[in-house]
Image (cartoon, rainbow, N blue to C red):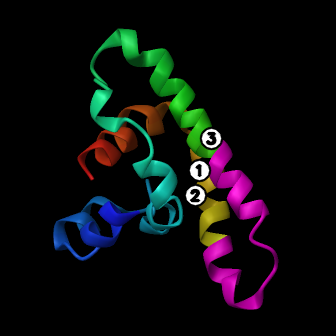
């Protein structure tokens, strides 16, 4: 999470995130994301496609697990809603997530 702590203060990082991959998801999964070997992934290499597909499925599962374990605290209501919305979008469009968002995650 140390990388995210530094990166979140850079203006160009804020411009990368949006509805396609909310900055809240990046923040919420910072330690999980940083534990992955992103630099070893060549998203243009067809041999990495299975790994990337599994990584996307793992990201979706991790987000779902963490959202489900958040509890119902009132102060977490908006964050939980945003994360659930992102989760549903990821589930619907995981092939799009595979090609586009992962390229952005690799850069950040």
Residue at point 40%, 50% (across, down): 34
Disc 3 marks which residue?
Answer: 92
Residue at (51%, 51%) from the top-left corner?
32
Secondary structure state at the residue bearing disc 2 = helix
The boundaries of the magenta stretch are 61-80
Q: Residue furthest bottom?
A: 75
The secondary structure that dominates the magenta segment is helix
Residue placed under numbered mark 2 in the picture: 86
Q: Tell me whether the residue at label 1 lies in contact with that at label 3, contact meaning CB atoms closer than 8 angstroms.
A: yes
Judged left or right of residue 56, residue 23 is: left
Residue 105 is covered by the magenta coloring: no
Q: Is residue 59 left or right of residue 38?
A: right
Residue 89 tag number: 1
Q: Where is residue 45? Give x, y as percent.
A: 29, 14
Above or below, 21 relative to 72: above
Q: In which quarter of the image is the N terminus?
A: bottom left
Residue 102 badge = none
Q: Left of 2 or right of it: where is 15? A: left
User: Would you say the residues marked 2 and 1 are in contact, meaning their CB atoms lie under 8 Å apart?
Assistant: yes
How far apart are labels 1 and 3 at the CA level? 5 Å
In terms of sequence position, does the residue under pointer 3 or pointer 2 come before the other? 2
Q: Position of residue 43 (x, y in %)?
A: 31, 25
Q: Depth check: give the residue in front, 65 or 3.
A: 3
| Residue 49 placement: quadrant | top left
Query: Mark 1 packing: few (<14 Cα in 10 Å), some, or many (20+)?
Result: some
Dot 3 falls on a residue whose secondary structure is helix
State the SS at label 1: helix
């Amino acid at each position: 999470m140390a990388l995210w702590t530094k990166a979140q203060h850079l203006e160009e990082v804020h411009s990368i995130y949006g509805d396609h991959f909310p900055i809240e998801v990046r923040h919420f999964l910072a330690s999980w994301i940083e534990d992955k070997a992103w630099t070893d992934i060549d998203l243009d290499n067809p041999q990495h496609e299975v790994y990337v597909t599994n990584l996307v499925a793992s990201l979706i599962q991790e987000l779902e697990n963490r959202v489900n374990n958040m509890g119902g605290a009132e102060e977490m209501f908006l964050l939980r809603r945003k994360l659930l919305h992102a989760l549903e979008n990821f589930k619907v469009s995981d092939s799009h997530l595979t090609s586009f968002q992962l390229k952005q995650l690799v850069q950040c």
